[in-house]
């Protein structure tokens, strides 16, 4: 029995090492580490060159205002997760629940989510007040609370599916981590595929862009780019924010390019650049690639759960033989997933920043017009109050895109490389 268990752990360890190696190789090979070709001149990012002292000061003031609630919320999430994986807190709280195991699991997810969300709610309110003070939010408290409840609802549903599945597998199979890894990968792919049609409509309405010269120009550009785009969708983001944004989501049959309605007030050549950037994401299948890396990461995480649960079983008072087979394990599971999400964030951001830089280069290659690119970056940064010079911690934790000064520097480097006048 002991030998069998030891063999199982060895197998899980081997699979973990293998999956880890595959992820590293896939990330190393698919991440565009150098967005510009070799020989591109280095242009240092310089906020003072493109932003006025007043704009720089305003961005810094906003950063200082939202920093405390953002960091406190992150700290609270990590602390709560730590409590769940390093103490019997979860088992104690969940011990009050009664009923069949799967009912206790779902109620457990609901209960722990409710506790964490209640603690984080005031910090969310604090953050939202800052957004309003700086004119970034257009929401009423009723709609803000409704949004928040909807997000919590989505998270409870997805977490319940995951936790019920893991515990069901752990109750049924000794080597539950094998089907759990396969299931986690599959669920990641399915969730990413259905995201635009299942989850996005919960928060926004989407309509096809109004017929007119802008729409015709954008579709002509997509055709020139060889990216099959049937439509550009406009999201009614203005009922929530004044911020400007656009994105690509889904893949295959669900792929869509979405622009915020707030963006449409910008000059047409700047909107065109934003869409050209999104076409870059579509052309390189960035959503699909990200999903596949996410699926490998989810499989890795599932096997890691098996190891981590064994490591923390005593501290959290879970049964030794198969700790995750017990409904009391909901807390450990949620805590571990939450920690893994926070810890993998910097790696995801690192990859994302390179992918974003490639999309920027694609936009420049397609439009060959760096001046509106730079104008658009200025507009995005000043409207969204983007951090123009984040410190190392902010950059590592939160920067999914290069900063505006970095993106502008890239455009200048691109212009020099292509012998075009440098704006
Ligand atoms: Zn992008």
Image (spheres, rainbow, N blue to C red):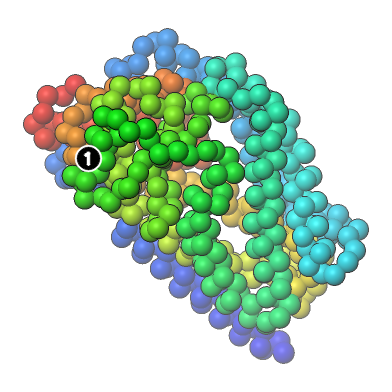
Using residue 52 as the reference point, say whether residue 75 is left or right of it: right
Q: What residue appears at the point 55 percent right and 27 percent down from the top-left corner?
A: 239
* Relative depth, front residue between 285 and 22: 285
Whole-percent x and y of residue 303? Answer: 58, 70
Using residue 38 as the reference point, say whether residue 175 is left or right of it: right
Q: Is residue 299 visible?
A: no
Q: What residue appears at the point 12 percent right and 24 percent down from the top-left corner?
A: 421
Q: What residue appears at the point 49 percent right and 49 percent down from the top-left corner?
A: 196
Helix, strand or loop status at disc 1: helix
Whole-percent x and y of residue 85? Answer: 72, 57
In the image, residue 157 sits, relative to residue 387, either above or below, namely below
In the image, residue 305 sits, relative to residue 32, either above or below, namely below
**Residue sitting at the far front:** 211
Using residue 356 as the reference point, say whether residue 125 is left or right of it: right
Q: Quadrant of the N terminus?
A: bottom right
In the image, residue 411 sits, relative to residue 338, either above or below, namely above
Whole-percent x and y of residue 71? Answer: 62, 34
* Relative depth, front residue between 280 and 302: 280
Place residue 132 in its image quadrant.
top right
Q: What residue appears at the point 73 percent right and 77 percent down from the top-left corner?
A: 171
Whole-percent x and y of residue 387? Answer: 45, 26
Using residue 245 as the reference point, say whether residue 9 is left or right of it: right
In the image, residue 96 sits, relative to residue 22, either above or below, namely above
Place residue 408 in its image quadrant.
top left
Q: Which residue is mark 1?
A: 221
* Relative depth, front residue between 10 and 73: 73
**Label 1 neighbour load within 10 Å: few <14, some 14-19, many 20+:** some
Q: Quadrant of the C terminus?
A: top left
């Amino acid at each position: 029995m002991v030998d069998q268990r030891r063999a199982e752990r060895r197998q899980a360890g081997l699979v973990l090492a293998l999956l880890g190696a595959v992820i590293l190789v896939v990330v190393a090979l698919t991440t565009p580490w150098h967005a510009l070709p070799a020989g591109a001149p280095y242009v240092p990012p310089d906020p003072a060159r493109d932003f006025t002292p007043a704009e720089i000061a305003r961005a810094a003031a906003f950063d200082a205002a939202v920093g405390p609630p953002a960091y406190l919320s992150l700290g609270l999430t990590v602390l709560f997760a730590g409590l769940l994986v390093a103490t019997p807190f979860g088992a104690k709280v969940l011990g009050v629940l009664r009923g069949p195991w799967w009912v206790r699991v779902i109620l457990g997810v609901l209960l722990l989510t409710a506790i964490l969300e209640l603690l984080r709610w005031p910090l969310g309110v604090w953050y939202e007040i800052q957004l309003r003070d700086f004119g970034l939010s257009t929401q009423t408290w009723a709609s803000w609370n409704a949004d928040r409840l909807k997000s919590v609802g989505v998270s409870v549903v997805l977490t319940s599916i995951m936790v019920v599945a893991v515990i069901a597998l752990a109750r049924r199979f000794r080597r539950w981590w094998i089907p759990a890894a396969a299931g986690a990968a599959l669920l990641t792919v399915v969730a990413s595929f259905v995201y635009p049609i299942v989850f996005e409509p919960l928060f926004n309405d989407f309509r096809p862009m109004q017929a007119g010269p802008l729409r015709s120009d954008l579709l002509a550009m997509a055709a020139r780019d060889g990216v099959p785009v049937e439509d550009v969708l406009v999201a009614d983001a203005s009922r929530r924010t004044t911020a400007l944004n656009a994105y690509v989501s889904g893949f295959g049959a669900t792929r869509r390019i979405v622009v915020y309605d707030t963006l449409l007030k910008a000059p047409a050549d700047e909107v065109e650049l934003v869409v050209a950037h999104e076409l870059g994401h579509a052309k390189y299948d960035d959503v699909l690639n990200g999903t596949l890396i996410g699926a490998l990461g989810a499989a890795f995480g599932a096997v890691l759960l098996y190891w981590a649960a064994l490591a923390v079983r005593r501290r959290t008072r879970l049964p030794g033989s198969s700790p995750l087979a017990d409904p009391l394990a909901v807390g450990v599971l949620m805590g571990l997933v939450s920690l893994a999400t926070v810890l993998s964030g910097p790696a995801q951001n690192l990859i994302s920043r390179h992918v974003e830089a490639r999309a920027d280069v694609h936009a420049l290659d397609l439009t060959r017009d760096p001046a509106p690119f730079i104008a658009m970056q200025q507009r995005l940064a000043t409207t969204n109050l983007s951090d123009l010079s984040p410190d190392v911690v902010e950059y590592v934790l939160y920067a999914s895109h290069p900063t505006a000064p970095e993106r502008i520097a890239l455009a200048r480097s691109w212009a020099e490389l292509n012998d075009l006048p440098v704006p």
